[in-house]
Image (cartoon, rainbow, N blue to C red):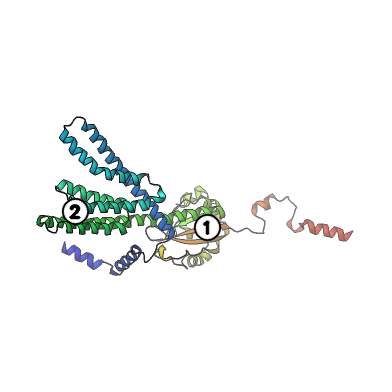
Amino acid sequence: YAILVLRRLWRCNWAAVRLAVVKHGRQMCFIDKAEGQHVKQFRRQRISWSTGISEALLHCVAGKYVTGLILLAAMPEDSVIFLARSFSRDLFIFLLLFLITVTPKRFAAYVLDFAHLLFTGCLIFIAFADPPASCEEFSALQLSRLLAGLMAGNARLTCPCTLLVFAMTCVAVRKDASGIEEMWGDAWLTLFMLVVFIVYELLLFRIVTDTVPLAVLATKASLLSALCDAVVTLGPDLQIVEKAPKLANLLCQKPEETKAQGMSPSLQGSNFLDFISQTDKERFMLFIYQIPVEASSASRAEPAPAEALNVQMQGGSSISIQVQLFHSSFLEPDGKVGHLIGIICETSDQPTLLETLETPHGAGTSNWEPMDLRKTRSQRSQ
């Protein structure tokens, strides 16, 4: 174990660890605020998970009540009194879970925080008035603390409340020698809960930071698809990561030709540089990497504006197309840089091949004149 620890310490990037600790510490202490969109999505995710946990616990407590009421009819009077006392103790938890479950979404965050504060007060009261007398009661109490912290989903609130409950419990048993010995186990459980609450909130924040950029990217891609002739998403190695049938049609790529070249008919997995003319590849590479993407999206006040570039693209049957590229970089969930490319085929004043074939034989384009110019010449001749 000592060799394993020394090896990890030797290979650890302490600069990265220090930056990560400072970054998350400043965010949790409200020194650095995350982006508004991330905060809103984090609140929605927290409410969704917390209400889901509370509803599941509500059904469990309700099942316990229904089962107990069924058993009450066939039990003696002493057992009925014991069960009634147990039910009255759990009635508060049932009402609290029911309140969280039926609360509207816009008030759920405040209700969750208030409920956890109320539950913390009850735990402090139990520590002084009715401390657990058996191992079963102690385990149930600790489990309720853990579930209440997970249901709140707010480490800035649950961690201080957990420490407060532990401190009040220490004060309550300070004169009992056996209770002081048992507090060592409570100390380890409290430390474990603190780690779980912090990791749980970081997990929620990581999910939000992964889903929000993907949602923004999907919105950008849908908007570009309405304005551009083709839209492609490139990975860090400039390979097309999603199907691009519009690009295949724009480049006149036939399915049999792409299969013969070892490519997908939708061009997925192909290198985008293969479709750029040789003279424009260097310009395209400079265009792609001229604006580096920040490692943290939260440190950017505004996203970098999209850039445009005119290049020649090579398609099937050795055709060459003049296009305009719009580029915007984004961060993938694994931290690598991706590229969103919008492609617009530039129009030309020269007649296309189809227009030339459809022109009647013997009719040249040099004799064509605008209608207004013809009228002016006829009036002058008159």
Q: Quadrant of the N terminus?
A: bottom left
Marks 2 and 1 in Cβ contact (< 8 Å): no
Could you tell me residue 101's position as x and y percent?
Answer: 35, 45
Say which element carries label 1: strand
User: Could you classify mark 2 by the number of other residues whose Cα lies within 10 Å: few (under 14), some (14-19), or many (20 or more)?
Assistant: few
Q: Which mark is residue 342?
A: 1
Could you tell me residue 64's position as x and y percent?
Answer: 25, 38
Viewer-nearest of labels 2 and 1? 2
User: Could you classify mark 1 by the number of other residues whose Cα lies within 10 Å: few (under 14), some (14-19), or many (20 or more)?
Assistant: many
Question: Tag 2: residue type?
Answer: Phe
Q: Residue at x 22, y 52 (%)?
A: 125
In this rendering, position of residue 22 left or right of residue 130 = right
Q: Residue at x 25, y 43 (%)?
A: 90
Q: Which mark is residue 128?
A: 2
Question: Tag 1: residue type?
Answer: Gly
Q: Residue at x 30, y 68 (%)?
A: 18
Q: Do we see residue 381 in this rendering?
A: yes
Closest to the observer, 203 or 28 = 28
Closest to the observer, 302 or 153 = 153
Q: Quadrant of the C terminus?
A: bottom right
Closest to the observer, 259 or 152 = 152
| In the depicted structure, whether residue 372 falls above or below residue 78 | below
Q: Earlier in the sequence, mark 2 or mark 1?
A: 2
Q: Which mark is residue 257?
A: none
Closest to the observer, 204 or 348 = 204
